[in-house]
Image (cartoon, helix red, strand yellow):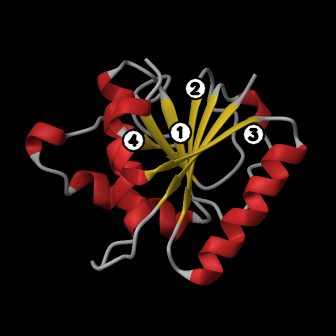
Amino acid sequence: MTNVTFYILEQQDNEQPQHWLLACQLAKECFRKKQRCIVRCADQQSAEAFDELLWQRPLDAFVPHNMTGEGPKGGAAVEISWQDANTGPRPVLINLLDEMPNDASRFRQIFDFVPSEESAKQQARERYKHYRAAGLNMQTLPASSIKENIDG
């Protein structure tokens, strides 16, 4: 059964989207706990921007990652994609899309976000409704609880 965790974000006060920064933290925690994950972005430009954000992390917070189809055979621990691609056995999805992924039920765990900005918050509400309608297990948590809630 797929578990979906929505993280509720506080007001944003920096130039990077807060949910992207939290997605980096989730990717790091998945890697630390030896869970392969995929980060799904809206398009190639967004995927490349998220890839760059991971490269900018401090050396002690480095997360091995690659874009779908690049890197070592089977990919790195964290894969970044902008399409519904069969990426092999990756039980965790970090969703940066504006909608529910078509293949959501194939993952064991999905992490999603409720941004503070009103239009993005409305999109998150729609995703939540779609996940729930698909029969997935739902939970909503404050963004501050990320570290404690990575499955592991």
Residue 100 appears in the rendering: yes
Query: Of discs 1 and 3, which sits in the foreground?
Result: 3
Circle 3 is placed at which residue position? 104
Q: Are discs 4 and 2 less than 8 Å apart at CB?
A: no
The amino acid sitting under disc 1 is: Ile
**Residue 7 x/y as whole percent:** 51, 52
Query: Of discs 1 and 4, which sits in the foreground?
Result: 4
Q: Kindly state the secondary structure of the residue where label 4 is placed.
A: helix
Circle 4 is placed at which residue position? 26
Mark nearer the N terminus (4 vs 2): 4
Circle 1 is placed at which residue position? 38
Q: Kindly state the secondary structure of the residue where label 3 is placed.
A: helix
Categorize mark 2 by other alpha carbons within 10 Å: few (<14), some (14-19), many (20+): some
Circle 2 is placed at which residue position? 90
Q: Residues under labels 3 and 2: Cα distance?
A: 12 Å
The amino acid sitting under disc 4 is: Leu
Q: Kindly state the secondary structure of the residue where label 1 is placed.
A: strand
Mark nearer the N terminus (3 vs 4): 4
Mark nearer the N terminus (1 vs 4): 4
Quadrant where the C terminus lies?
A: top left
Q: Please, is residue 135 above or below residue 12 in the view?
A: above
The amino acid sitting under disc 3 is: Ala
Q: Residues under labels 4 and 2: Cα distance?
A: 14 Å
Q: Are discs 3 and 2 less than 8 Å apart at CB?
A: no
Mark nearer the N terminus (3 vs 2): 2
